Image (cartoon, rainbow, N blue to C red):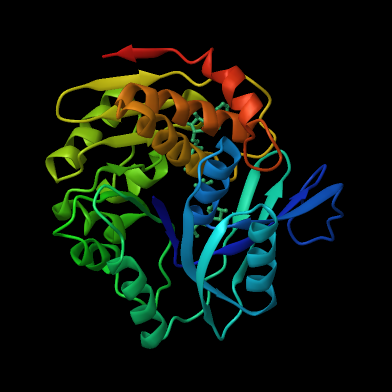
Amino acid sequence: MIYTVTFNPSIDYIVSLEDFGLGTVNRVTKDAKYPGGKGINVSRVLNNLGKKSKALGFIGGFTGDFIEEFLKKENIDTHFIKIYEDTRINVKVKSNEETEINGNGPHIDDESLERLFNKIKKIKEDDYLVLSGNIQNSLPRNMYSKIQSLLKDKRVKVIVDTTKEALISTLENKPFLIKPNIKELEEIFETNIETREDVISYGKKLVAMGAQNVIISMGKDGALLVNKDVILYGEAPKGESKNSVGAGDSLVAGFIYGYGKNKNLLDGFKWGIACGSATAFSMDLCERPLVEKLLKEIKILTL
Ligand SMILES: Nc1ncnc2c1ncn2[C@@H]1O[C@H](COP(=O)(O)OP(=O)(O)O)[C@@H](O)[C@H]1O
Ligand SMILES: O=P(O)(O)OC[C@H]1O[C@](O)(COP(=O)(O)O)[C@@H](O)[C@@H]1O
């Protein structure tokens, strides 16, 4: 079974505008609301590909209800823990550029946390666990590392997609996959990344620090996969970007789906890039027909 954990879900409120002006009234030309948060997006994409998962995490208030109802309608198996404060709303402005305003999110009390830990302890050998997205500031930065420790005696494949210390603290427990984008890679190493060689060299550092596989996603420039044996570069298909929110999460979902077929990294990487790009070319998250079409266009180079 594949489990996704979203500590800080969101409603993603996506607004399209002709021109976005600061300090003035802006009128939207198109808007949409989707359930968001990285683990939830992974569960939704897996579902679109025809693969079941269980979505865990914390939701609260009317915004939390929206998310749960939306996922239930899509037939996604949810096991959320209800908290008192409202789940956040993240605003995504699509204009000449994409601007995102992500909320802090609600407080998680100790009892709710304990309930999540108890659910996680029930995960079995050979299951997948996706720990994705930002952890509320009120919680310790090594939260994902603590969760890994709950499963240390089981061969669970842990995938981590988060930023800075929260990500770094998981590396000593050797996660199966981490997926920083370029900006996150720059934040981790407090540096500017200019060239593909730089990306590879920082990817290798993350492998040396403990990650089994590192995929660095680079938006329209595709992605690199680095592990102790290979460096693969995957070109992204060309197309009109409609909404890249969730492209990274789609890459993670596609990877798990493709890898899960024959435990083959190359298949995982191809499906990952196809799903990421298919989401970038869609308003909502990707659907299987476009993913299958793009899959035929993906070229992978061994570097
Ligand atoms: N404009 C785009 N054109 C084609 N593919 C894209 C585009 N944006 C994203 N993708 C695909 O989605 C993947 C993840 O996108 P990226 O923006 O790097 O992730 P994140 O959402 O984590 O920042 C990329 O590796 C690529 O395959
Ligand atoms: O947990 P964070 O880092 O605040 O990110 C949450 C946001 O990221 C998303 O999960 C999208 O992530 P990606 O674009 O990286 O795939 C949105 O749905 C959500 O609004």
Q: Quadrant of residue 237?
A: top right
Is 295 left, or right, of 282 in this rendering? left
Quadrant containing the C terminus in the rendered view: top left
x, y percent for residue 32 = 77, 52
Could you tell me which residue is drawn at 63 percent across and 50 percent down? 99
Q: Is residue 154 left or right of residue 283?
A: left
Q: Is residue 238 above or below residue 45?
A: above
**Image location of residue 34, percent across then percent down:** 68, 55
Identify the residue at image location x=44%, y=81%.
108
Return the residue nearer the eye: 113 or 281. 113
Q: Is residue 219 left or right of residue 161?
A: right
Q: Report the label total.
A: 0
Residue 265 appears in view: yes
Query: In percent of the image, x 50 and y 47: which residue is there?
Result: 52
Q: Which of 240 and 50 is in front in this view?
A: 50
Q: Give the camera-side residue of 30 and 211.
A: 211
State whether residue 239 is above or below residue 194.
above
Left or right? Give the position of 258 relative to 103.
Answer: left
The reply to whether residue 246 is visible in this rendering is no
Q: To which quarter of the image does residue 102 belong?
A: bottom right
Provide residue 187's location: percent of width, then percent of height.
33, 50
Counting from the top left corner in percent of width and height, residue 256 is at 40, 38
